Image (cartoon, rainbow, N blue to C red):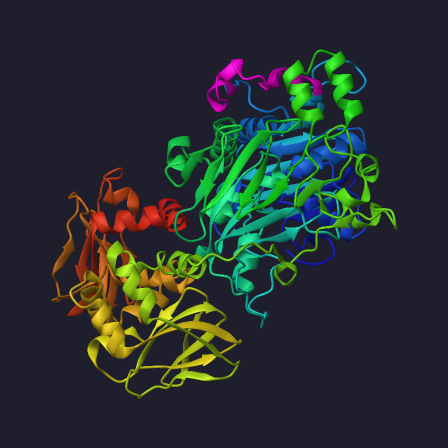
Amino acid sequence: MSGDKYIYLPKGGIIIDTSIGAIQLGAPPETIKDSMSLNRAVPTYYIAPKNLFSHKKMSSLIDIEFPCYFNYYVLHKSITIFCTKRQSEAIGGFFSESYFGPKELNLEIEYIDGKNNPYFPDMKKELEYFSTHPKENRPMVLKDFIEFVILQENKTISYKGITFYLDVNSNKILINDKGVEYELDWNLDYDNSEVKKNESDSIFLPPSFGITTLGSSHGFDPKGKTSGFIFWINGSGIMIDPPIDSALWLIDENVDPRMVNSVILTHCHSDHDAGVMQKILQEGRVTLYTTSTIFTSFIKKTSLLTGLNEIDIVELIDFIPVMIGKPININGAMVTFSYRLHSIPTIGFEVFFKGKTVVYTSDHLNGKKYFDNLKELGVLPDGRYEELSNFNWRKDIIIHEAGIPPLHTPIEVLLELPDEVKKNIFLVHTDKSKIPEGSNLTVSPTGLSNTMNIQVQASVHSESVQILNLVSGLDMFMDIKFEKAAEFLSIIKYRRFKKGECLIKEGDFGRRFYIIVAGRAKLIEKGLEKAILTSGSYFGETALILNSLTTGTLIALTDIVAMVIEKEDFLMFLANTPVYEKLKKLGSVRSQGSWEAIELNPLFNSMTINQKNQLELLFNFEKVNKNDVIVHSNKALDFAFIWNTGSGVIKDKNNKIEKILKKGDFVGNPMYLVGEKALDKTVIADSDSTIFKINWDSMLKFYQKNPRILLELRDMDEY
């Protein structure tokens, strides 16, 4: 597809201009910002791609929530979606969950004393109030927002003089608009993002207590980033409502994903949950904090979008349910949650850490006159009215939204506050141009360089906590016992290296072990770039363990802060621990070509260096002879393997060669390892070869720790 007939949007998706208006294939998160920035009308017509969720980009391919809002509230009409019957049920289901909220509510388990809690809300009435038709005084329904036109497989349908033919064999959608023909790829996918690759030279050291604002605007602002945050506590990050691509942006800014290992989800509007799956599937397991009500909505939406079973999604996440009004310890801070007034169940929270208090209000309607009206209408019980009306403005920092009522707090409410209160307020979910000059209200500054460093009293343990938070996530230290922590703290030293400085030179004797705290470096072996190391990466261990020469040169691409341990201290620390044997094994399999095998695999080479280290530690080097049967047809697959040297073949039940195996090819689909699919093929060595075998239970544990790999392999037809 080329030429002026097709308009390729920056965030993904394709537009064709037809006699009835623009028709858009695919709708990635924030897609209406593309139309606005291109000075185009926001489309009314959309085509759902074959898959509604992209495992490449780890996000929705049909995020129609904001196109619906814009068309309905601004243009006063519904959108039309061309899709299959099954897709219409999924799309209607997750949009309804976003707009109308959950059909069933069980807030009693989320409040101390349940319904007897004096602040217990009538959430059903609140949701009904916000979903009442603005003109007809009736409950709004899905048809107010979306009309579905069902595409049928290998059949032509007609709509307003335009014909659509869904060819499921070629995965094409053929459109004829009065003689003008279009051909669209139904199997649309994209992994593009507006995040630039590795251009930042800056390094970031998280504060003991602080806030990074990822975005301070809203879903209708084409020039602003959608609101989202990282709260830093004891050097570990908690991501709040991750905006789309925020997890990728942090990597580009040289921030190790494991530095941000938790997420708080305040509610399930797409401008707040669109980036959650990206973060969950990025690296390692993520802890998710929210209420059971909001979590259930999120799981339902994600299941409908991805096609995955709800139980399977729950197993990808370490979910910690929060109680309303009951403080919970997160990374050493006490965090207290409360339900805000919004169109669907939404929480805000207060963080107390070392004498300082920070409030994030989340999306909500705040204002006495609105509460008075809702009490008069019988929507707010007395206790709920009292709770909302007595918002405590006397906090050290308040991150407050300022949007358009009735879903959001109008700026007029905040303009009336005294200046001594305003100085502690940072606005989000707002267009900066809407803030009056001289109002003494400040929009929260965005980006790592504008991270708020909240001054708190230093603790004698602060640095130790931050160090242990960093190293506890490293695979090599997972087996270290608690009593070794003090010894570790006593042998590390912090060192800074300048951009361009050589940390290790190929062919030298190994003298030190390094862990990058902040920054990025390039590893070169035999004149070729082998890897880019970032925050959380470690290196130098192989030469120390094997008492050998270093095999690579490491050059700082940015300024670097690293933890350094001298050789004697490192070896003494590891003596008589499982780590010593693990690292010895790692050096051994690398000498046999494990790294090169991983790099040649299109799935594994996209992993972070830490994930690759995890995988290599599972490898068992094995030689196989020509004609050896490695996998027998109709027998359980009780191990996985990646091909190293030589070649092999996969044969079907008729002994016909289906695939030739070479270095980097992998066999170990989780569906076969757990017995959900039966094997009907044979794997045979075609020459004397070597492979790296992985025990089936170890491979399954790796999948559980790295759910993106699990999901991508589950979708593949191969072993």
The location of residue 698, given as percent across then percent down, is 23, 51
- Against 287, is 107 above or below? above
Q: Residue at x 34, y 65 (%)?
A: 489
The location of residue 370, given as percent across then percent down, is 77, 23
The location of residue 356, given as percent across then percent down, is 59, 47
Q: Is residue 116 magenta?
A: yes
- Against 30, is 582 above or below? below
Q: Which quadrant holds the N terminus?
A: bottom right
Image-based side of 669 in relation to 313, left or right:
left
Q: How many marks?
A: 0
> Hey, which quadrant is residue 510 in on the image?
bottom left
* Residue furthest right as drawn: 437
Please state which of residues 294 and 111 is positioned toward the viewer in this rendering.
111
Res. 665 in view: no
Image-based side of 26 in relation to 317, left or right:
right
Image-based side of 504 in relation to 162, left or right:
left
Please state which of residues 300 and 561 is positioned toward the viewer in this rendering.
561
Q: What stretch is highlighted in magenta?
A: 107-129
The location of residue 417, given as percent across then percent down, is 80, 38
Q: Residue at x 64, y 52 (%)?
A: 213
Image-based side of 345 in relation to 635, left or right:
right
Res. 35 in view: yes
* Residue furthest bottom as drawn: 507
Q: Is residue 44 magenta?
A: no
State the predominant SS element of the stretch in magenta: helix
> Hey, which quadrant is residue 240 in on the image?
top right
> Hey, which quadrant is residue 317 in on the image?
top left
